[in-house]
Image (tube, helix red, strand yellow):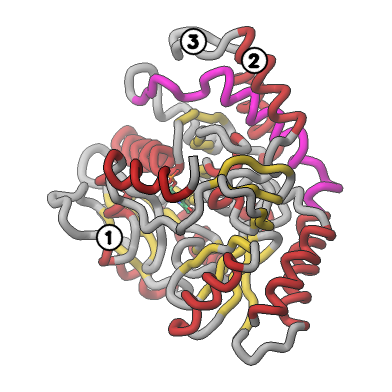
C-alpha cells in the first residue's frame, strides 16, 4: 500500500487523536528507517525514547522470538524467570528494594501514586494524600496522571480529575515547601523535564528537595519514564544527582520496543503494596521481560553508558559547531538533547529535516528534541549533522 491509500483508510477507521506527520514507516535497521514508499531517514526520535537499542536489534529480536516459542504470556498468578530476572537486574544495579511491573509510563506513575498514598495511610492514617509535582512536568494521560501533570492545558474536558495534586515551580524550594502542608505524602518529579522542553533540574535543588522529604517523611518519587534505561548516560538519571529516591518509575526504553513499565521502590517502602492492592493482567509478561533483559544486558554496561555520554557530547558539539544563528543553545544530557530555537521557526525547521531524511521531535515551545537510539553510530550521527548543517 502507498502512503496515500493507507492515509485514506486511517482517516476512516482510526480515531484522530494524533497530529501525525505525513509518513508511514515500513521497517528499520540500526538508527535508519524506511517508509512505505522506500525513502530512508536517520532517526533521532527512537519512537519517543523507546527503541533505545535501535531497529532490528539482533539480541532483542532473538530474545523475543525464543521466549514467544516457549511461553508468550501467563498470568501474574504464576512466577516466570524472565520477570524475576528484570527485577533482580534493576534492583542490583540501583540499590533499590523491589519492582512492580506495569505496561506504560502512565501506569507506572499510577502505581507510584498508589504506593505513596498507601505508605502514608499505613503509617499516619487518612488525610495525608497530596502529591507535589512540578510546573511544566509531564506524567501521563490517565485521569490521575493528567492531573499530576503540572500544565493547566492538560486539565480540561475530562472532569472530574483525581484530586490531591499541587504544583511547585521547578528550582524554587520555597514554593515547594509552601505547597507541602500536613496533607502531603510525596513529591513526584522528572530530573530532566522531557515533554516540557528538555529542562534539567539543578542538582542542588533536587538534593534540597530530598532533604526536605526526609524531614517530613514524604516519599521522593522520580519519574524516569523518559530519562531511564541509559538515556542520559547512566542506567538512571538519578544516579548522577547523588540522591536516594524512594520510588523510581520507568517505561519507554525498558522493553526496547515492546510495551513494559515498572515502579521500583526503596527497601523502606517496597512492601507497601501487598497482595490484592495492585495488579495488571499483562504486567511483567514473559515476552516483554525477555526483551527487557536483552535491553538491560546491552545498556547496563559501563562501556556502553560512557559511549552514550560521548555520543551525546559529539552530537551537541556538532550542532553548536554549525554556528547557525537559529540555534540559541543545546541542553540536556547524554542522548536526551534539546536544540533551542525560535518558537516561530521550529515547525519549518522540523519539516525541512524530514524532507531531507532526518526525524526529530519537539518539546515545550522552543526545543527540537533529540532522542536517538543509544546504539546510534558515529557515521549515522555524521549523516544527521550533515542534514542539520543544510537545514540550519
Ligand atoms: C512518556 C512519559 C510518560 C507517559 O508514558 P506512557 O507510556 O505514554 O504512558 C510519563 N512520564 C514521562 C516523564 C514521560 O516522558
By secondary structure, the bulk of the magenta-drawn segment is best described as helix
Residue 308 visible, this angle: yes
Residue 237 screen position, x and y as percent: 63, 54
Instruction: Pick whichever, 314 or 32, lies toward us.
Output: 32
Which residue is more in the foreground, 376 or 189?
376
Q: Secondary structure at mark 1?
A: helix
Residue 322 vertical position relative to residue 147 in the rendered view, above or below: below
* Chain part drawn in magenta: 278-306
Residue 275: x, y in percent? Answer: 38, 17
Residue lying furthest bottom: 325
Q: Position of residue 345 (x, y in %)?
A: 49, 83
Q: Residues within 10 Å of mark 3 (few under 14, many from 20)?
A: some
C-beta proximity under 8 Å, tags 1 and 3: no
Magenta span contains residue 331: no
Give percent across and percent down for residue 179: 30, 66
Mark 1 vs mark 2, CA separation in Å:
39 Å
What mark, if any, has residue 267 been given in the picture? none
The residue pinned by badge 3 equals 74
Q: Which residue is mark 2?
A: 67
Instruction: Determine whether 311 is above or below 324 in the image.
Output: above
| Element carrying mark 3 | loop
Which of marks 3 and 1 precedes in the sequence? 3
Label 2: element kind: helix
Q: Is residue 231 left or right of residue 151?
A: right
Q: Quadrant of residue 313?
A: bottom right
Looking at the picture, tell me which residue is in the foreground, 321 or 133. 321
Q: Which residue is mark 1?
A: 154
Q: Does the magenta run of residues contain 296?
A: yes
Does 265 sit left or right of 70 as displayed?
Answer: left
Asked if residue 48 lies left or right of residue 322, the reply is left
Amino acid at each position: 500500500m502507498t502512503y496515500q491509500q493507507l492515509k485514506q483508510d486511517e482517516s476512516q477507521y482510526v480515531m484522530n487523536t494524533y497530529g501525525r506527520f505525513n509518513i508511514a514507516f515500513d521497517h528499520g535497521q540500526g538508527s535508519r528507517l524506511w517508509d512505505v514508499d522506500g525513502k530512508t531517514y536517520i532517526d533521532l526520535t527512537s519512537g519517543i525514547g523507546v527503541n533505545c537499542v535501535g531497529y532490528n536489534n539482533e539480541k532483542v529480536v532473538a530474545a523475543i522470538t525464543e521466549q514467544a516459542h516457549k511461553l508468550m504470556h501467563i498470568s501474574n498468578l504464576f512466577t516466570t524467570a524472565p520477570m524475576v530476572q528484570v527485577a533482580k537486574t534493576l534492583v542490583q544495579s540501583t540499590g533499590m528494594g523491589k519492582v512492580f511491573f506495569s505496561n506504560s509510563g502512565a501506569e507506572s506513575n499510577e502505581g507510584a501514586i498508589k504506593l505513596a498514598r498507601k505508605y502514608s495511610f499505613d503509617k499516619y492514617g487518612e488525610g495525608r494524600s497530596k502529591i507535589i509535582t512540578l510546573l511544566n512536568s509531564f506524567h501521563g494521560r490517565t485521569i490521575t496522571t493528567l492531573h499530576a501533570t503540572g500544565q493547566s492545558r492538560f486539565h480540561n474536558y475530562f472532569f472530574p480529575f483525581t484530586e490531591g495534586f499541587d504544583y511547585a515551580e521547578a528550582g524554587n524550594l520555597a514554593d515547594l515547601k509552601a505547597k507541602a502542608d500536613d496533607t502531603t505524602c510525596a513529591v513526584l518529579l522528572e530530573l530532566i523535564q522531557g515533554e516540557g522542553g528538555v529542562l534539567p533540574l539543578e542538582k542542588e535543588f533536587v538534593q534540597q528537595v530530598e532533604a526536605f522529604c526526609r524531614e517530613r517523611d514524604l516519599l521522593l518519587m522520580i519519574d524516569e519514564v523518559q530519562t531511564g534505561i541509559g538515556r542520559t548516560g547512566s542506567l538512571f538519571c538519578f544516579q548522577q544527582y547523588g540522591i536516594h529516591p524512594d520510588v523510581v518509575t520507568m517505561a519507554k526504553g525498558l522493553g526496547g520496543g515492546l510495551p513494559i513499565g515498572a515502579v521500583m521502590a526503596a527497601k523502606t517502602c517496597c512492601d507497601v503494596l501487598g497482595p490484592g492492592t495492585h495488579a495488571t493482567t499483562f504486567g511483567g509478561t514473559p515476552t516483554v521481560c525477555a526483551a527487557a533483559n536483552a535491553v538491560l544486558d546491552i545498556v547496563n554496561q559501563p562501556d556502553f553508558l560512557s559511549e552514550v555520554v560521548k555520543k551525546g557530547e559529539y552530537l551537541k558539539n556538532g550542532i553548536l559547531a554549525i554556528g547557525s544563528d537559529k540555534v540559541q543553545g543545546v541542553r540536556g544530557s547524554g542522548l536526551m538533547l534539546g536544540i533551542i530555537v525560535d518558537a516561530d521557526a521550529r515547525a519549518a525547521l522540523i519539516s525541512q529535516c524530514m524532507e531531507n531524511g532526518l526525524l526529530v521531535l519537539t518539546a515545550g515551545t522552543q526545543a527540537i528534541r533529540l532522542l536517538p537510539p543509544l546504539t546510534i553510530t558515529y557515521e549515522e550521527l555524521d549523516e544527521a549533522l550533515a542534514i542539520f548543517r543544510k537545514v540550519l
